[in-house]
Image: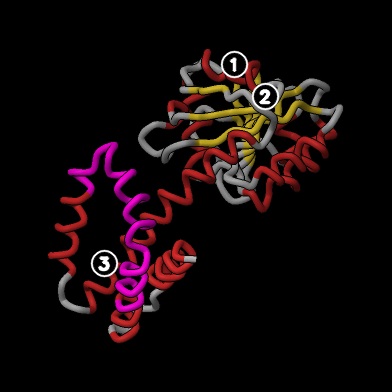
Amino acid sequence: MIIAVLGLGEAGSLIAADLAAAGATVRGFDPRVAPPAGVIAAAGDADACRGAEVVLSVNSAADALDALRAALPACAPGTVWADLNTATPGLKERLRTEAAGAVEVVDVALMSPVPGKGLRTPMTMSGPAAERLATVLGGYGADVLVLDGPVGTAATRKLLRSVFYKGMAAAVVEALTAARAAGLEEWLRGNIAAELIKADAATLDRLVDGSKKHAVRRREEMAAAAELLTDLGVTPRIAAASRDLLADLID
């Protein structure tokens, strides 16, 4: 089977290399990156997709539509076009609309960092051709979960998770930046680590219920925290957002 991989950055290169090692014929293109060992270099998006039964678009959300448009003339009818970019459900649906009648678009979400896992990075996918794609990639060792729903379903799940996970990471970065300015970074780092270690399923309920029950007090606390960060020379983006969200809970 010929599989095209468009975009050979960190994720694309690792997935392409694993597919080639598992026995697939992989053709790759990236205008800025040479393909890894075992992957055949193509001259462009269309050249990579010529003769491919599956196309993995792993470039970026900003390039996803252009890559599809460039490659469509070279794709055979029924080709599975898997969009692995972190993009909105709306963009995934636009890809499906643009490709209607030419290729079968599948919405794929990579649910954890690719380094260290490569093709075995957990993937969720949705769309009418998702089962077909899952069979192909699963045959090469991919970790795949097919969701019941249209194109955009997988993207919705990933982005909702991102609100939590990336938001938590942003809060940690802001807090540690302020702690460094206050000369307390090591203390706060240990405190955060201890809280993460002891968290369990009940932690979620405590966070949600406590925010609603104690919104007035916590709003004032976060207003003070935002003022402290400003005094330390740190822009309080997350602290200020927390203050404003708690104010909305009061209302």
Tell me the quarter of the picture where residue 215 sits: bottom left
Task: In the rendered view, tell whether residue 232 sits above or below residue 12.
Answer: below
Q: State yes or no: discs 1 and 2 in contact (Cβ < 8 Å).
A: yes
Amino acid type at mark 3: Leu
How would you rate the neighbour count of disc 3 (Cα within 10 Å): few for under 14, some for 14-19, many for 20 or more? some
Mark positioned earlier in the residue sequence (1 or 3): 1
Name the residue that disc number 3 marks: 176
Q: Position of residue 30 (x, y in %)?
A: 62, 44
* Residue at image point 64% right, 33% down: 107
Task: In the rendered view, tell whether residue 72 sits above or below residue 19.
Answer: below
**Secondary structure of the residue carrying numbered label 3:** helix
**Secondary structure of the residue carrying numbered label 1:** helix
Tell me the quarter of the picture where residue 167 sits: bottom left
Amino acid type at mark 2: Val
Q: CA distance from mark 1 to mark 2?
A: 9 Å
Residue 54's disc is: 2
* Image mark count: 3
* Residue at image point 84% right, 31% down: 100
Mark positioned earlier in the residue sequence (1 or 2): 2
Q: State yes or no: discs 1 and 3 in contact (Cβ < 8 Å).
A: no
Mark positioned earlier in the residue sequence (2 or 3): 2
Task: In the rendered view, tell whether residue 52 sits above or below residue 151.
Answer: above
Q: State yes or no: discs 2 and 3 in contact (Cβ < 8 Å).
A: no
Q: Is residue 213 visible?
A: yes
Q: Is residue 41 visible?
A: no
Secondary structure mostly taken by the magenta-highlighted segment of the chain: helix
Q: Is residue 233 left or right of residue 94?
A: left
Is residue 122 found inside the magenta-colored segment of the image?
Answer: no
Q: Residue furthest bottom?
A: 231
Q: Which residues are magenta?
A: 196-224
